[in-house]
Image (cartoon, helix red, strand yellow):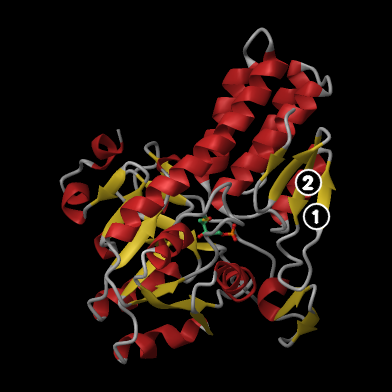
Amino acid sequence: MQALNTTSLQLKENRLWILDQQALPQEKRWLPCDSVDELVEHIRSLRVRGAPLIGLSASLLLALLAERGLSPSELEQALQTLRASRPTAVNLMNNLDRMKQALAQPDWATAMAAEALRLVEEDRALCDRIADHGAERVQPGSRLLTHCNTGGLATAGIGTAIGVLLRAHQQGKIAQVWVDETRPLLQGGRLTAWELGELGIPYQLICDSMAASLMAAGQVDAVWVGADRIAANGDVANKIGTYSLAVLAHFHRIPFYVAAPHTTHDPHCPNGAAIPIEQRAAAEVTGVAGSFGACQWAPADAAVYNPAFDVTPAALISGWVLDCGVITPQQVAAGVFQQALR
Ligand code: MRU
């Protein structure tokens, strides 16, 4: 396959390389990934993470395995295993559906390589269009709050919510970004802080619990987040903590925007209650671990509740900023979400 270079994925000499997002920002460590088991482990441990990137990494690996001569039944098995690696982000399922169609072609190896590279190029273009639409909604001098990581690390392009922040910054509209640290896995504190620094966007890092008092003090003009799945009624699953931000924004009358590619929409999922929410290991909450070291503070046998995502009801969202345009609450209330996606 032809060489490929994104912020966090590379194809070099017919090998997939992933940027280890658990090692950032302390270390920029590229890991080779040659098998389905390896990639599943990278995805489960969030070395590869972010809704679009999970789907792209799975598609690229499948294409490489097809080129290496795996049979159609082995590839079908690989596809099923990858599909089950993380349940909430629907981009993985959507990308794998397209790879399955390529697998059904007579010349499946060529078709899968072309499809995987097309998915990467499409994702880059989707990010650019989201950024264009989103930046129009950003007022000059804005102080924007974001949660989790939605940038070039999580996509093949400039990102979704962070793509909007970047475009608005290029237009001179950003006074500063408030970055939620995003417990338990610190995607904000480790990854978004790093990315915004690299992009030259002024930011301040906060603990998740500080958003309320900042809003009360009039220090937040809008909230921008990404999405892992958008249900047919407009409910949005995103990183745990997103829902509480939406409630806070609603109380303080602050716009709350969701930025995502249309591939994050799941028309088969009627509402947020039907979105599968991944439950994760207790150790993520009883302490913290990473390339900076490990520390456990809770009792070893502490009972833990650790959902990786929550659902924000459509009623709390000011706009769904997609590649095809901004969908308004009025459109969603009128049930035109699906038509508006076309
Ligand atoms: O568990 P993660 O780090 O994969 O969760 C990521 C998020 O929730 C992002 O906000 C979402 O995937 C959008 S990324 C463009």
Which amino acid type is shown beneath numbered disc 2? Trp
In front of the other: 257 or 4: 4
- The answer to whether one can see residue 310 in this image is no
Question: In the image, is residue 243 above or below residue 47?
Answer: below
Residue of label 1: 30
Left or right, 21 with respect to 239, comes to right
Q: Secondary structure at mark 1?
A: strand
Res. 295 image quadrant: bottom right
User: Which x, y percent locates residue 214?
Assistant: 37, 88
Question: In the image, is residue 305 above or below residue 217?
Answer: above
Which amino acid type is shown beneath numbered disc 1? Trp
**Numbered circle sitting on residue 304:** none
Left or right, 53 with respect to 41, comes to left
Question: In the image, is residue 219 above or below residue 35?
Answer: below
Q: Are marks 2 and 1 in contact (CB under 8 Å)?
A: yes
**Numbered circle sitting on residue 17:** 2
User: Which x, y percent locates residue 153?
Assistant: 61, 57
Res. 192 image quadrant: bottom right
Quarter of the render that holds ligand 1: bottom right
The residue at 68%/25% (across/down) is 113
Indicate if the residue with disc 1 has its beta carbon within 8 Å of ligand 1.
no
Q: Secondary structure at mark 2?
A: strand
Left or right, 321 with respect to 100, comes to left
Left or right, 149 with respect to 108, comes to left
How far apart in space, not on screen, are marks 2 and 1 (Cα)?
A: 6 Å
